[in-house]
Amino acid sequence: MTPANDTANYDETCPLLHAHNPEAQIAEKPKYTPLPKGQLAALCIVRLVDPIAFTQLFPYVNEFMNDLHLTDDPSKIGFYSGLVESTFAVSQLCSIYQWAKISDVIGRRPVIFLGIIGLAITTLMFGLSKSLASVLVARCLGGLFSGNVAVIHSVLGEITDSTNQVVALPIYGLTWPLDHLLAGTFSHPASKYPEILGFQFLKDYPYFLPCFIAFVIAMIGIFLGFIFLEEVPSATPRKAVPLIQTMANRATTVPALPEKPLSVSKLLSIPIISALALSGFMLSYLATSFDVVFVLFCYSPIESGGLAFSASQIGYSLATSGAIGATIQLCIMSYLLRTFDSAKMYSFCISIWPYPFLVLPILNLIARAGLDETTGELGTTTVALLWVGIAFVLMLTKVCCLAYPVSMILVKENAPNAASLGQSNGIVQFAMCFARSFAPFVVSALFSISSEYNLLGGQLWLVIMVTVSFLGMKTSRKVEQNSVRTIG
């Protein structure tokens, strides 16, 4: 990842027209546009609801499935937890384009509010579930309502521009790591905090409280959104862009193009859009797979290749991940966006993905070496080493996930015109949701099979995920090759 040195500014109406002589272009720095702080704050709270609903169950989903007594074989728990995790994303995938179309007819605000209300209610349903069928129904309905995520991304693109996105994107990007700060802390509250929360209702429904907290956050998002979030037109006319003719060396003006959205097939025929969609698919598959396999790895017994963590310890791990991600977003993200070429930064982040997976077996070896066979407990030094290793591997994943906000920038900068921005963003989000729809089920089943049949010493899942990581690196290079060079 190297700093972007060329200062050419490319207009979004024709980003694919690369200049043959960048030095001949007039680089006129635009004036800074003040951020709409109220709208951005409301949008961030609204955006936080989806990752909380999707991932708040990760620390305790294996324990939840075990409590339902679906199987007596611990190695098969991952199959059911993966099924529950994937159901949400499959439903989201099926509804994402429908929500986008509805938002073009009735506006962004109604779609966002309706989706959040539905997601909040179905999250409560999940916390009250007592069978696998009710769990799957709740997750399926929640996924359908969460399909408005692409609409939320579009609103962010509409309320920001190239002058303020390096400030807005890191703040908006906080929404994903912050959900992990809540993870795992509030499951089984009656047994963890009997003096304060020892109510019979919470004993009967031990997973209701984290779902209720997600519900409250959703209600706060609706309240703030109703006050601050304004309706934004889906497209605005573009102004003429002054350029220098490279052959005649004289100034001309490119007339404003009619704002007509391109079809999906035409957008996919643009190399950078198809590259962003394919790379986004790989990014989402790797990120989702790691989240799932990390929880399974922590939950599994040490002799089976895991760390034998409790749901609370897994929650603390994910809270550590959230804190690291938030720190990176707030402290260095803006600097990185201003300093480095967006496409190179995107490629660099994805190139790190093999290493978090490779570190996990090393943590298991540390746990095995420090396990007291008499007491079955880990020594103090071993525990300290494990937490240092966990912090390191989670830091790597948060650097990898910086590719998400950078992807949003790349989509905005490379969309062929303003009217196609929402559609371009929808294509990339669809690819990401598609990967997220089956990644939990595939990787959890793969982890269970590898452990149950001792395939490659129980590490078949690792070999496959590292291979997929290298394929992800290859797809990100296509983004770098086809994207316009930019300065954040």
Image (tube, helix red, strand yellow):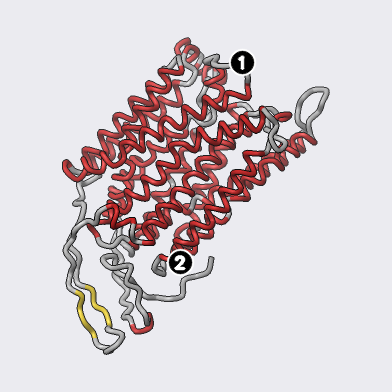
Q: Which residue is mark 1?
A: 72
* Residue at left offset 57%, top offset 27%: 78
User: 199 above or below 123?
Assistant: above
Residue 384: image location, x then y, percent = 72, 39
* Residue at left offset 40%, top offset 25%: 212
Numbered marks: total:
2
Mark 1 crowd level (few <14, some 14–19, many ≥20, 10 Å Cα) = few
* Residue 481: mark: 2
CA–CA distance between discs 1 and 2?
51 Å
* Residue at left offset 50%, top offset 55%: 331
* Residue 100: mark: none
Residue 441: image location, x then y, percent = 50, 32
At label 1, the amino acid type is Asp
Q: Earlier in the sequence, mark 1 or mark 2?
A: 1
Quarter holding residue 18: bottom left
Mark 2 crowd level (few <14, some 14–19, many ≥20, 10 Å Cα) = some
User: 313 above or below 234?
Assistant: above
Tell me the SS state at disc 2: helix
User: 267 above or below 200?
Assistant: below
